[in-house]
Amino acid sequence: KAGGWDPLFALNHTCAMIRDNIKCLSRRTWCTTKRVDRLQCRLDLYVCAHNALIEMKLHGKRRRRRGIPDGAGGAQGGWPLQHLALAA
C-alpha cells in the first residue's frame, strides 16, 4: 500500500466482508432495514456461520498436523447444520 500501515484495515475489511456476505446489506439501499430484529437475526447467523467456518478450518489443520486424514472419523464435507444451530 502506498500509505503504509493502516490501523483501520482490519475493521474496514471485516465490515466489507459482512456487507458482501449478508446480501441485504450489499444492496443499494443497505442502510434501510424494515425490521431491526430481522437484521440482528441475520447478523447473528452470519457470526455463527463465520465462527464455525474458522473453527472447522482450525480443526482440519490440527487433524492434518496429527496425521489424521480429512475423511476419517467425522462428517464428510464439513460439519452438519445441526452443529451450527447448537452453536448459536
Image: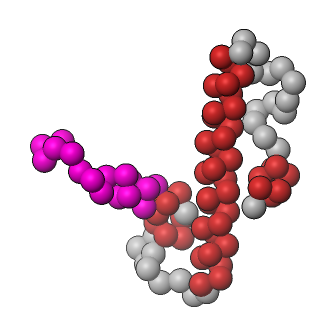
The residue depicted at 42 percent of the width and 61 percent of the height is 15
Quadrant location of residue 73?
top right
Instruction: Pick out the residue farthest to the top.
Output: 67
Question: For residue 16: magenta?
Answer: yes
Residue 67 percent coordinates (x, y): 72, 12
- Quarter of the image with the C terminus in it: bottom right
The residue depicted at 64 percent of the width and 25 percent of the height is 61
Can residue 16 be seen here? The reply is: no
Residue 76 percent coordinates (x, y): 81, 30
Instruction: Pick out the residue farthest to the left.
Output: 2
Q: How many marks?
A: 0
Depicted 73 relative to depicted 31: above or below: above
What residue span does the magenta drawing correspond to? 1-17
- Quarter of the image with the N terminus in it: top left
Depicted 45 relative to depicted 2: above or below: below
Taking 36 as reference, is 70 left or right?
A: right
Taking 77 as reference, is 32 left or right?
A: left
The residue depicted at 44 percent of the width and 79 percent of the height is 31
Can residue 86 be seen here? The reply is: yes
Taking 8 as reference, is 24 left or right?
A: right
Question: For residue 50: magenta?
Answer: no
Depicted 36 relative to depicted 85: above or below: below
Residue 35 percent coordinates (x, y): 61, 86
The residue depicted at 67 percent of the width and 73 percent of the height is 41
Depicted 30 relative to depicted 22: above or below: below
**Color encoding of the figure:** secondary structure
Taking 63 as reference, is 71 left or right?
A: right
